[in-house]
Image (tube, rainbow, N blue to C red):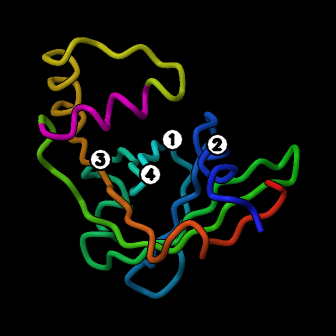
Amino acid sequence: MASKEKIEAFLAEPRNVIVGGIRSDGRPQLTPNWFAWDGERFYVSTTRTRAKFKIFSRDPRAELAVDDATRFRCVLVSGTVDIREDLKAELGHFRAIREKHGVAVPDDDEHLKSLEKDQRVLLAITPDGPIESWTAWGLD
């Protein structure tokens, strides 16, 4: 079993998380996304026009997969989504996502205007259990 420290280090690498939700007809919906992890929650940016917003507004259950196919490493997590719409309050999390993936972050005013224009919201995903309960392989 991978240690908490190894999982945290893996999550700090610039990679995607596959976010899975449940469509209204019961089929899964999966999308790759940039994310930030703060030790308690995963943060994913999306817009009000995307399927994830509609899905998690109706049903907050989520499945996450953070994968490194080149070295056969993976972390799988079940969680609950809280949709955060106060963009100004969440600027730090939006900034963390961009910085983790090497994208320049504009000043706060410009960043906030861009988030509002794009109809952004933040998915704050709380794992259902502690890191020690997650499925992880290839991190030992």
Give the amino acid type for the residue marked by disc 4 in the picture. Gly
Name which residue lies at 29% across and 47% down.
47
**Mark 1 → mark 2, Cα distance in angstroms:** 16 Å
For residue 39, the mark is 4
Name which residue lies at 15% across and 23% down.
113
Locate residue 111 relative to residue 9 in the image: left or right. left
Locate residue 47 relative to residue 27 in the image: left or right. left
Locate residue 93 relative to residue 25 in the image: left or right. left
**Mark 2 → mark 3, Cα distance in angstroms:** 28 Å
Query: Circle 2: is it few (<14), some (14-19), or many (20+) Cα within 10 Å?
Result: few
- Label 3 close to label 4 by CB (< 8 Å): no
Query: Circle 1: is it few (<14), some (14-19), or many (20+) Cα within 10 Å?
Result: some
Location of residue 10 by image quarter = top right
Percent across and percent down for residue 28 are: 54, 76
Which mark is in front, 2 or 3?
2
Which mark is in front, 1 or 2?
2
Q: Which residue is identified by label 3?
A: 47
Q: In the rendered structure, which disc, 2 or 3, sits on the residue that comes first in sequence? A: 2
The magenta stretch is 89-98
Percent across and percent down for residue 88 are: 12, 34
Position of the N terminus, as image quadrant, is bottom right
Give the amino acid type for the residue marked by disc 1 in the picture. Trp
Q: Which residue is identified by label 1?
A: 34
Which mark is in front, 4 or 1?
4
Q: Which residue is identified by label 2?
A: 9
Q: In the rendered structure, which disc, 2 or 4, sits on the residue that comes first in sequence? A: 2
Which residue is situated farthest in the bottom direction here? 26
